[in-house]
């Protein structure tokens, strides 16, 4: 009887072991298959992006001496025939409108029409007019769903200020240049000095909500948005990254979406151009950096400096600046032996990219600016 019992237990254990091994093998296969599909999805997107960008640049070159496209801090929009170009530099708080026209009278009419269009432009309509996005969506056979009706720039200008700009437009001497037997007329106007703060105020509700949920200081979220996009709602980089907090679809986008919703997916630009989505993902990613990827760093201030740098360049590069490897646990031993001020100095000296050094400095300085705005109830 006892022998039979041991035999039954042995067989049961063997079956369980085999079942568990089969389970692990199936799990690994599922994960490998899922990762392959995810990689294919992003590869397809990147291929469509690169192909569309090349075509877009060639179309611009046919009419304009310099190829300018939207960037993290600049919104640039061409009309369908590429005879009008609107540019908003959110970082330097300027608007430039350029038109191809036969004479100055026609130019001023086109400039006025373009200005009025710009005052009506919102994220939804701007996305619909974006030739690059249209080309990408055509390549991927996608039908984007943009719901944000946030104004591109009119929301920081009072009716009086808009009328003042119209007066300037009608009277200010126009710059004039020739290109490929066409005449280009240019108007430059300066935005009010408080335009950036007014843009920041538009996102107060989202920043308050997601900073609190992510256990991240509000001033840090504002400083990151300022440094990433200068509050340009249509921010786009060549990486590509999209929106206010410049979310990269494959890396931070996938990880953060999975953290929030338990699903890995490559996020489309239309999802990331929604400011609420973008701030939610960006704030959550800051939480993940601070409390997950870099949680072996004990001092909160040291961890903050490393999180800011990691938002720009990744936790691996932060670790590499201390130990020469991307092992953050190994790097944390060295970091934990240093006071926060020395951690900051070390990062500023040893981070692998000058861009990241500037980024760390700018975000750190801007945190204090936004903290004062919050304390004075302006945000």
Image: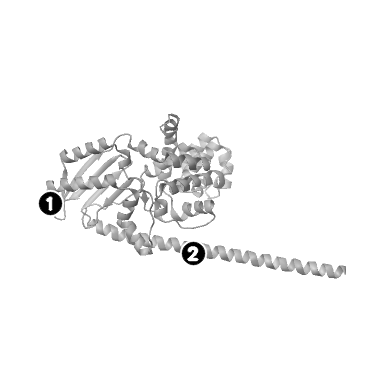
Q: Residue at x 40, y 46 (%)?
A: 244
Q: Secondary structure at mark 1?
A: loop
Q: Quadrant of the C terminus?
A: top left
Disc 1 to disc 2: CB gap under 8 Å: no
Dot 2, how many residues are within 10 Å of its Cα: few (below 14), some (14-19), or many (20+)? Answer: few
Residue furthest to the right in view is: 1
Residue furthest to the top in view is: 376
User: Could you say where residue 74 lies in the image, as x and y percent from the top left?
Assistant: 32, 46
User: Where does label 1 land, which residue?
Assistant: 102
The residue lying toward the viewer, choosing from 304 and 203, is: 203
Q: Secondary structure at mark 2?
A: helix
Quick check: 289 above or below 265?
Answer: above
Count of labels shown?
Answer: 2
Residue 273: mark:
none
Q: Residue at x 33, y 53 (%)?
A: 127
User: Could you say where residue 65 lies in the image, as x and y percent from the top left?
Assistant: 21, 52
| Direction from residue 100 to residue 146 in the image, left or right | right
User: Could you say where residue 156 lies in the image, as x and y percent from the top left?
Assistant: 32, 39
Q: Quadrant of the N terminus?
A: bottom right
Dot 1, how many residues are within 10 Å of its Cα: few (below 14), some (14-19), or many (20+)? Answer: few
Residue 37: mark:
2
User: Could you say where residue 354 lies in the image, as x and y percent from the top left?
Assistant: 41, 44
Q: Residue at x 59, y 64 (%)?
A: 28
The residue lying toward the viewer, choosing from 257 and 362, is: 257
The residue lying toward the viewer, choosing from 223 and 167, is: 167
In primary-sequence order, the first of circles 1 and 2 is 2
Q: Is residue 352 visible?
A: no
Quick check: 378 above or below 89?
Answer: above
Q: Is residue 259 visible?
A: yes
- How far apart in space, not on screen, are marks 1 and 2 (Cα)? 52 Å
């Amino acid at each position: 009887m006892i022998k039979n019992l041991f035999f039954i237990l042995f067989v049961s254990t063997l079956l369980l072991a085999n079942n568990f091994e089969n389970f692990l093998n199936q799990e690994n296969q599922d994960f490998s298959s899922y990762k392959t599909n995810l990689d294919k999805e992003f590869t397809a997107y990147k291929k469509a992006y690169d192909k569309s960008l090349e075509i877009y640049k060639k179309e611009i070159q046919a009419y304009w001496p310099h190829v300018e496209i939207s960037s993290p801090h600049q919104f640039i929009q061409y009309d369908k025939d590429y005879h009008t170009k609107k540019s908003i530099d959110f970082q330097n708080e300027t608007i430039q409108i350029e038109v191809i026209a036969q004479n100055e009278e026609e130019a001023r009419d086109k400039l006025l029409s373009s200005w009025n269009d710009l005052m009506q432009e919102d994220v939804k309509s701007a996305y619909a007019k974006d030739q690059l996005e249209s080309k990408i969506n055509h390549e991927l056979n996608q039908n984007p769903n943009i719901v944000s009706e946030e104004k591109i720039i009119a929301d920081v200008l009072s009716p009086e200020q808009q009328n003042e700009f119209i007066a300037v437009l009608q009277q200010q001497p126009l710059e004039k240049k020739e290109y490929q037997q066409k005449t280009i007329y240019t108007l430059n106007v300066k935005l009010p000095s408080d335009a950036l703060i007014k843009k920041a105020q538009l996102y107060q509700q989202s920043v308050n909500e997601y900073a609190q949920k992510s256990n991240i200081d509000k001033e840090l979220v504002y400083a990151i948005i300022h440094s990433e996009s200068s509050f340009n709602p249509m921010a786009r980089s060549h990486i590509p990254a999209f929106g206010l907090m410049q979310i990269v679809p494959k890396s931070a986008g996938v990880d953060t979406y999975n953290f929030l919703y338990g699903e890995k997916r490559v996020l489309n630009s239309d999802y990331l151009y929604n400011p609420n989505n973008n701030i939610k993902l960006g704030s959550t990613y800051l939480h993940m950096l601070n409390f997950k990827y870099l949680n072996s760093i004990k001092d909160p201030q040291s961890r903050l400096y490393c999180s800011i740098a990691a938002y720009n360049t990744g936790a691996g590069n932060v670790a590499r600046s201390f130990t020469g490897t991307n092992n953050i646990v190994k790097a944390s031993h060295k970091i934990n032996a240093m006071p926060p001020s020395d951690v900051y100095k070390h990062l500023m000296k040893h981070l692998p990219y000058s861009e990241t050094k500037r980024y760390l400095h700018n975000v750190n300085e801007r945190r204090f600016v936004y903290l004062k705005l919050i304390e004075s109830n302006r945000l």
